């Protein structure tokens, strides 16, 4: 029996992985434009990383589709070559070759479960912050960009920089505060400093600008001279001032449930629905494996292209229910409705597979 399992295990696995690579490549190419568009302000590495992170969202779905298509093609070929007929004639149940597809489906479901609950939330969170992180790293590592720097209501320019990284002939301008109060901090002051340098906090979150030999050009005391002054800036606030706020898709399942159980989540039913939906998606490979086997075997006289068309039916039903589930959960306020796709596919698939697997 093990030789039979190993024979189909190898074929189904190779066909499924080849299908997955092709589908993943198509999605990756289709996501290049989105990656370049979102990487405005970053470099080529940021664009490539954003593209990969956007594509990572589809990883478990493509894995399930690859398994379904791989199972259909493998067992349609075996059925056309009369291998399944020979197995039946030898008194072996068709459940035996199906075990190979089911083993791969269970393995894919385990990998998909970890991906859905942990890796995809991380990728979903980080893909919106690649450019801001790149900008922060640039500021920390290179300190300056050219002979000028500006962010918010602050602007600075300088003449030259020495070997120690200190700037000379520095002109600093602070824009007016939103309140317009001339006495408030940042009320439109302009400073001319003989020397300036940057200090980065150990955690890389705060940058301090130190000025020495400062002359006030425009302030309450015009022409006053100050020995030294410093300004503190929060790098995270600068680079992520318009960043996207975190949502349920950015949190891992254990983080979501911890917020629900502690009573701090503003939509506990929505968080539970998200966790149930992730678990349902993770179950897809194990659900599609026996269906792919049965579709392939029953398509013996119809050809592989017909088998592929029949293989699209479970995916259409599954994702149709996925689209319908959010509407139903809002009406019934019952988060386990996220399992609707798996329940519908299972309810329709069990009678379909029973005729073939009852022997």
Image (cartoon, helix red, strand yellow):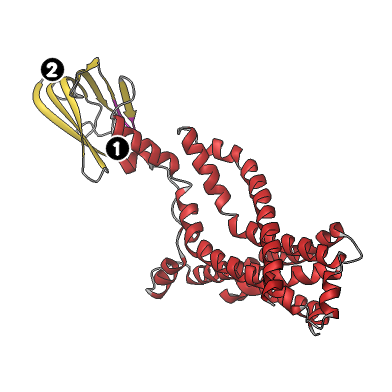
Identify which residue, 75 or 58, lies in the foreground.
75
CB contact under 8 Å: marks 2 and 1: no
Read off the residue under disc 1.
179
Image-based side of 347 in relation to 185, left or right: right
The answer to which quarter of the image holds residue 243 is top left
Identify which residue, 71 or 157, lies in the foreground.
71
Extreme-left residue of the structure: 227
Extreme-right residue of the structure: 301
Q: Quadrant of the N terminus?
A: bottom right
Residue at left offset 88%, top offset 60%: 303
Q: Residues within 10 Å of mark 2 (few under 14, many from 20)?
A: few
Q: Is residue 23 magenta?
A: no
Residue stretch in magenta: 151-155
Q: Is residue 155 above or below residue 286?
A: above
Q: Is residue 249 above or below residue 168?
A: below
Residue at left offset 47%, top offset 71%: 268
**Residue 335 on image: x %, y %:** 56, 74
The answer to which quarter of the image holds residue 261 is bottom left
Image-based side of 326 in relation to 43, left or right: right
**Residue 89 on image: x %, y %:** 86, 80
Q: Earlier in the sequence, mark 2 or mark 1?
A: 1
Q: Main secondary structure of the magenta part?
A: strand
The answer to which quarter of the image holds residue 189 is top left
Read off the residue under disc 2.
223
**Residue 353 on image: x %, y %:** 79, 77
Mark 2 element type:
loop
Residue at left offset 88%, top offset 67%: 300
Q: From mark 2 to mark 1, how far is it between C-alphas? A: 25 Å
Identify which residue, 281 or 38, lies in the foreground.
281
Q: Quadrant of the C terminus?
A: bottom right
Residue at left offset 51%, top offset 72%: 272
């Amino acid at each position: 029996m093990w030789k039979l399992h190993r024979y189909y295990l190898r074929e189904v696995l190779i066909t499924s992985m080849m299908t997955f690579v092709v589908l993943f490549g198509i999605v990756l190419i289709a996501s290049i434009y989105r990656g370049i568009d979102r990487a405005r302000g970053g470099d080529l590495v940021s664009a490539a990383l954003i593209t990969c992170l956007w594509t990572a969202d589809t990883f478990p779905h493509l894995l399930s589709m690859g398994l379904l298509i791989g199972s259909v093609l493998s067992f349609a070929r075996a059925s056309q070559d009369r291998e399944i007929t020979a197995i039946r004639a030898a008194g072996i149940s068709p459940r035996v070759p199906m075990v190979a597809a089911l083993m791969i489906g269970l393995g894919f479901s385990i990998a998909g479960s970890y991906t859905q609950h942990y890796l995809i939330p991380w990728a979903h969170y980080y893909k919106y912050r690649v450019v801001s992180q790149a900008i922060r790293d640039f500021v920390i590592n290179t300190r300056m960009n050219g002979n000028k720097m500006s962010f918010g209501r602050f602007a600075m320019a300088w003449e030259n920089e020495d070997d120690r990284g200190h700037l000379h002939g520095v002109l600093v301008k602070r824009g007016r505060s939103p309140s317009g109060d001339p006495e408030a901090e940042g009320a439109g002051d302009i400073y001319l400093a003989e020397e300036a340098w940057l200090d980065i906090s150990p955690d890389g979150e705060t940058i301090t600008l130190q000025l020495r030999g400062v002359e006030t050009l425009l302030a309450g005391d015009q022409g006053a001279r100050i020995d030294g002054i410093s300004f503190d800036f929060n790098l995270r606030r600068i680079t992520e001032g318009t960043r996207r706020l975190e949502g349920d898709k950015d949190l891992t399942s254990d983080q979501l449930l911890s917020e629900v159980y502690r009573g701090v989540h503003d939509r506990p039913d929505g968080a539970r629905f998200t966790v149930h939906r992730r678990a349902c998606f993770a179950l897809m490979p194990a659900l599609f494996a026996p269906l792919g086997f049965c579709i392939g075997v029953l398509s013996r006289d119809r050809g592989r292209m017909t088998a592929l068309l029949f293989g699209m039916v479970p995916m259409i039903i599954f994702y149709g229910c996925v689209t319908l589930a959010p509407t139903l959960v809002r009406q019934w306020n019952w988060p386990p409705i996220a399992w609707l796709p798996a329940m519908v596919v299972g309810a329709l698939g069990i009678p379909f597979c029973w005729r073939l697997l009852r022997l």
